[in-house]
Image (cartoon, rainbow, N blue to C red):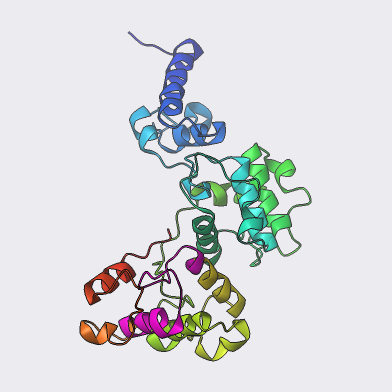
Amino acid sequence: MQLAGTSMSAPVVSGAVALLREAHPRWSPTQVKLALKQTATHLGYSVDAQGAGLINATSALRSSALSVWDIDGDDGVQFNDALWAMRYLFGHRGESLAQDLTNNFSSRSTAQIEFYLERLKLAGLLDIDGDATFDALTDGVLLGRYILGFREERLVDGAVSLQATRDAAQIVDFIETAIHPSYPFLPLDIDVNSIIDANTDGYLVILYASGFGPSQYAPYVGSGSRRSVNEIHNYLSVLDQMGALDIDGDGRVLAGSDGILIARYLSGIRGEQLIDGAIESSATRTTAEQIVAFIENISIR
């Protein structure tokens, strides 16, 4: 018996959509559609004859469609995610970045969202129109329009720069095929040059803990850094807010204890030499093993 036609395909697609919505209740219609299309089995016919292909509900359920754009980690790509990106590209950080955007479903804190957006920027993923710049009024707007379902001229009208290298179709393809940044993200690579060095990253922490600002950072930024001195300062500030720089756990970030501990750790010093004279009397982490474990478990993903 052969089953064909819309009377057969409609209930099959509807059932697959229902399974996806049950598994991912916060997915947008665009995510559901893309998951079904990207995981369909190609039947060897033209797109006009087969569309995206034969639905594979099992693969669709395992799909991470558009997950790179789930900025707040709530398992859904909504317009809010574009607003996070736009505010970030406008230069908002901390409380001004998060104002009225947080929700109860988010799995990322504001600090983690800020770091995630930085990773997307460093990987070039926030340059949506391909003009080698990052602009809220072009790249941020394009992401927002895409999420709202705008396509073709409605997607790009007034939202691409004169130097853009992508047209509407290429922008859609760029957004839909983007994958999570693959470069290693090392929390103590303060200047983001893929090298963790006591003489650069360690000293930048000491300067920050000593109360110095971006104007004093430049001599200690490593070669090939992908952060400006202002971005370095913002990064250290958020690490501080998260408690990640309070290495000995005394509730403070001090150059003579936490800064020294990080610099020594990055120099390869371990055991009693690591902590000698660098632990505050009110510290809650007092052994070399506890200090090493804390530093090696710093996570801001």
- Quadrant for the C terminus, please: bottom left
Residue at figure coordinates x 33%, y 85% from the top left: 264
Q: Is residue 128 visible?
A: no
What is the residue that sits farthest to the top in this orientation? 1
Check residue 118 for magenta coloring.
no
Residue at figure coordinates x 41%, y 33% from the top left: 40
- Quadrant for the N terminus, please: top left
Q: Is residue 161 above or below residue 80?
A: below
Q: Quadrant of residue 87?
A: bottom right
Q: Nearer the viewer, residue 248 or 86?
A: 248
How many discs mark residues in the rendered view?
Answer: 0
Q: Is residue 74 above or below residue 287?
A: above
Boundaries of the magenta span: 239-265
Residue at figure coordinates x 67%, y 54% from the top left: 86
Q: Position of residue 297 (x, y in %)?
A: 32, 64
Q: Quadrant of residue 136?
A: bottom right
Q: Position of residue 234 (x, y in %)?
A: 57, 70
